[in-house]
Amino acid sequence: MAFDFIQNDFRTKQPIDNCLTRYFRNHKFLGSRDRRLISSVIFGYFRWYGWLRIVVPELINVKKALLLAFILENNQTNDFIKFWCTDTTLEFEPPQSFNNQPETALLEKLQYIQLFEPNIQLSHLLPDFTPPWVQGKLAYLQRRPHLWLRSIYKDAYRSLSYLRGKKIPYRIHPQQSSAIEVFNSFNINECVSFKKGELEIQDISSQLISLICHPEPNDVWWDVCAGSGGKSLHLSALIDGSEPIYATEIRKSALKALKKRLQKKWSNIIPIDWDGKTKLNFPKTVNKALVDAPCSCSGTWRRNPELRWQLKPEDIEGFVNTQRCILKHIVHNYPDIKTIVYATCSILPEENELIINHFLKQNPLFSNLPIKHPLTQKIYSDGIYISPPESDGNFMFTAILNQNQ
């Protein structure tokens, strides 16, 4: 059973999407509809786990827990759900539909789940250490965002012929004409624009970080924790490859993925295997650094709901130490770097505001630069959280640290 397979990996803190990929690879007889159903149930279980562990303690009735997960994950009660309810002899049938508006739908789902256990509250859906402001965004945390693509062209329309030909519904962001939200799943490896490097998979919040960097044609950037290179590719597109971008990464698998992506385009991006400690000698003087730091990934709970139950408060200290060490290494070893853009996909102040405050105390020559939100145009003076509904993707934090002249 898929759930047993996933549960084993969940206990060892493995990403659920990777587990599902392995499961489907080992069960090739499953069709596309079966895979969608299984994915919805599994992701729904972890998204609504805070309630399900109260209604079905110790998983004494797995079938009931998975049915409730599927009901809560979907807004419509179709014939399949009705059959499953009858087969499971579920005590309370779900309503025919939940509201399409996120906040209203969440309250309706709370009313439904309270039929099983009246003491359940909204707060049970989040770990105790979740910041209060995130609780106000709970309705969005309980919805998986759509796939976001980025076109290398300012007008994305010219790179979307595949989506139009396949009648795959999408929309171009009204304020960011190179960002595309795709509403249905599809095999992107069949897309010619993706193969040519004209389209990249990149969450909308990640795209906004690159825009906040505001790279100039003469800037030489160091993408310190480049991962598989999404932001390096975006920075390069923004300056049309006019200057080198040094992309360093400690993980071999991520570096391999980055090198593969670079085969399509952007020869100005130079991938470097870096241990995070050794001083690097760049061929050209670097003046700006992007630190998309290793973190708890708590900002990705929308796409990876299992992470909110795998993360423990004691884990955060290790990330904080790493974040501080990276910033300290840059300041102490690269005096020509005058601007550091710090970013995380975390919602936790320990990894965000408190990191910035600590850095500024240790480095009084640096200060926080004001940031204009690319979508709302609102100015923030002490860093910015990018989150829904303004940005319907992951939660991210960023701050610009600039050395005073």
Image (tube, rainbow, N blue to C red):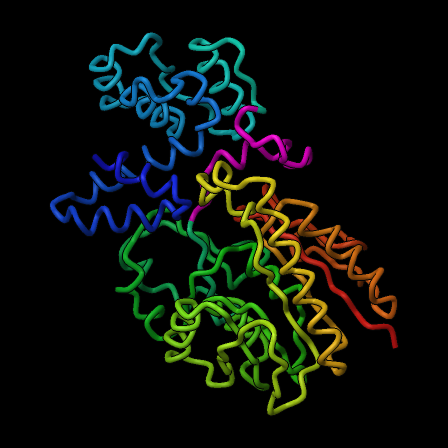
Q: Position of residue 95 (x, y in %)?
A: 38, 15
Q: Residue at x 51, y 24 (%)?
A: 106
* Label total for image: 0
91 lies above or below 404 = above
* Left or right: residue 205 compared with residue 146: right
Q: Which span is picked out in magenta?
A: 124-146
Give the residue displayed 29% in from the left and 23% down from the top: 62
Residue 125 covered by magenta stretch: yes
Horizontal and vertical percent for residue 20? 29, 46
Residue situated in front as seen by the camera: 353 or 390: 353
Query: Image quadrant of residue 40?
Result: top left
Q: Nearer the viewer, residue 76 or 386?
A: 386
Q: Quadrant of the C terminus?
A: bottom right
Q: Relative to 76, does residue 365 appear above or below in the rendering?
A: below
Question: Which residue of the protein is positioned furthest toward the bottom in this rendering?
Answer: 283
Q: Residue at x 26, y 15 (%)?
A: 85
> Where residue 69 sits: x, y (%)?
37, 26
State whether residue 85 is above or below residue 127: above
Determine the residue positioned at 76% across, 66% down: 401
Q: Is residue 42 magenta?
A: no
Choose between 43 and 81: the one closer to the eye: 43
Where residue 88 appears, x then y in whole percent? 24, 15
Quarter in which the N terminus is drawn: top left
